[in-house]
Image: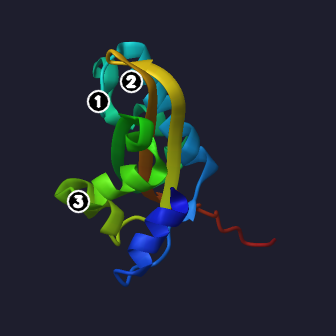
Amino acid sequence: MLCLTNYARIHSGLKRLVGSPTLDQAGEAKLDADLNCGEFSHTPCSKPFEEVFAAYLTGATAYTLGENIAWGTGSFGTPRLTMNGWLHSTEHLQNIHSPAFHELGIGYLAGQAFQGATGATLWSQEFATRFPVVQRTSKSTPH
């Protein structure tokens, strides 16, 4: 999915996104919450959107986040068809093509029972950029 996303970005004149294991974990957590809550949502069980990003945001002074989620069964759950759906959706395409994002995490759960379907595959793309805390150094005068 990272390769497909970067392919779409490069062909639109944008920089590649860097894969992030921390954002991968956020994506898995979001999909787990969707499964546990039995809903397809960016805020499953009414939890704040940013909750799954806590580890990524530690120490950040500013950040930008975005998310695409999808699920399907059979061929509709494959990386290519999932990405095709996102590319043909204005809101999802905005995240994929946003120059504000520099990193990407992928959530992926296959073979799930979800919303009455069996064998469902759930996907998430976690887009982010963070700006770290500025470290203040104290000045001392030698004696």
Q: What whole-number distance in Å separates the C-alpha atoms at marks 2 and 1?
A: 6 Å
Where does label 1 land, which residue?
41
Q: Is residue 69 above or below residue 32?
A: below
* Quadrant of the rendered image containing residue 96: bottom left
- The location of residue 75, given as percent across then percent down, is 42, 43
**Residue 25 located left or right of residue 32:** right
Q: Residue at x 20, y 55 (%)?
A: 91
Disc sitting over residue 34 in the figure: 2
Q: Residue at x 47, y 51 (%)?
A: 79
Query: Looking at numbered disc 2 in the image, what kind of residue is underneath it?
Result: Asp
Q: What whole-number distance in Å separates the C-alpha atoms at marks 1 and 3?
A: 19 Å
Query: Looking at numbered disc 3 in the image, what kind of residue is underneath it?
Result: His
> Crowding near pointer 1: few (<14 within 10 Å), some, many (20+)?
some
Where does label 3 land, which residue?
88
- The location of residue 12, given as percent across then percent down, is 34, 80
Residue 71 in view, yes or no: yes
- The location of residue 59, given as percent across then percent down, is 54, 48
Task: Label 1, secondary structure: give it.
Answer: loop
